[in-house]
Amino acid sequence: MTQNITSIGQIAVIAKNTARAVTFYKDVLGLPLLFETNGLAFFQCGETRLLVSKAETEEFDHPGSVLYFKVEDLEGKVAVMKDRGAEFLDEPHVVGQMGETEIWMTFFKDTEGNTLSLMTER
C-alpha cells in the first residue's frame, strides 16, 4: 500500500457568520451545498469538499489560505458573480506562463474577509 498523498479531500474556511457565508458560497460562487449540521456547512468543489464553519478555537479564528477555484470561462464566471453581488479586487489578468499555457487569475473576497481567486489556464 502506497503512502503517497493523492489529493486534498477537504479544505476548511473560517466564517464569522456561517449563514452569511453559506449564502455566499452557494448563491454567489455557485458551489453545490452538500449538507449543514451543527454550524458546519459542506460544499462540493470537484473532488474536494469545502467546509465552512466558525473557528473551533481562538488560534484558528483568522482568514485562511487563498483558495483558487478553477473555471473554464473566467470572464463569464466573473460576470455571473458580479451580478450576484461579489466584489472583485482586480480584473482577470495573466499571472504567468507555463510553456504555451497562460495562467489567468482574478481575486475577490468572500463575506467573511477571506481572499479567494478564480483561475483558468489558456
Image (cartoon, rainbow, N blue to C red):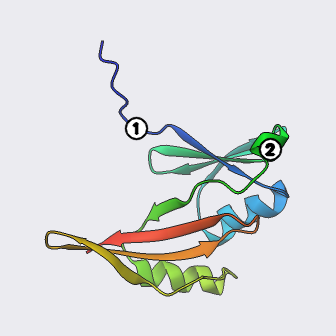
Q: Are marks 1 and 2 in contact (CB under 8 Å)?
A: no
Q: Say which residue label 1 marks.
A: 7
In the displayed orientation, state which residue is furthest to the top.
1
Badge 2 crowding class, 10 Å Cα cut-off, few under 14, some 14 to 19, many 20 or more, is: some
Could you tell me residue 65's position as x and y percent?
59, 54
Quadrant of the rendering where the N terminus is positioned: top left
- For the residue pair 14 and 36, the one nearer the viewer reads as 14
- For the residue pair 1 and 29, the one nearer the viewer reads as 1
Could you tell me residue 29's position as x and y percent?
60, 68
Badge 1 crowding class, 10 Å Cα cut-off, few under 14, some 14 to 19, many 20 or more, is: few
Which numbered marker is on residue 55? 2
Numbered circles on residues, count: 2
The secondary element bearing badge 1 is classed as loop
Which numbered marker is on residue 65? none
Residue type at mark 2: give it.
Ala
- For the residue pair 13 and 86, the one nearer the viewer reads as 13
Q: Is residue 97 shown left or right of residue 27?
A: left
Q: Which residue is drawn at 74% across and 58% down?
A: 22
Q: Is residue 81 shown left or right of residue 2?
A: right
Does 11 appear above or below 100? Answer: above
Q: In which quarter of the image is residue 120?
A: bottom left
User: Which is more N-terminal, label 2 or label 1?
Assistant: 1
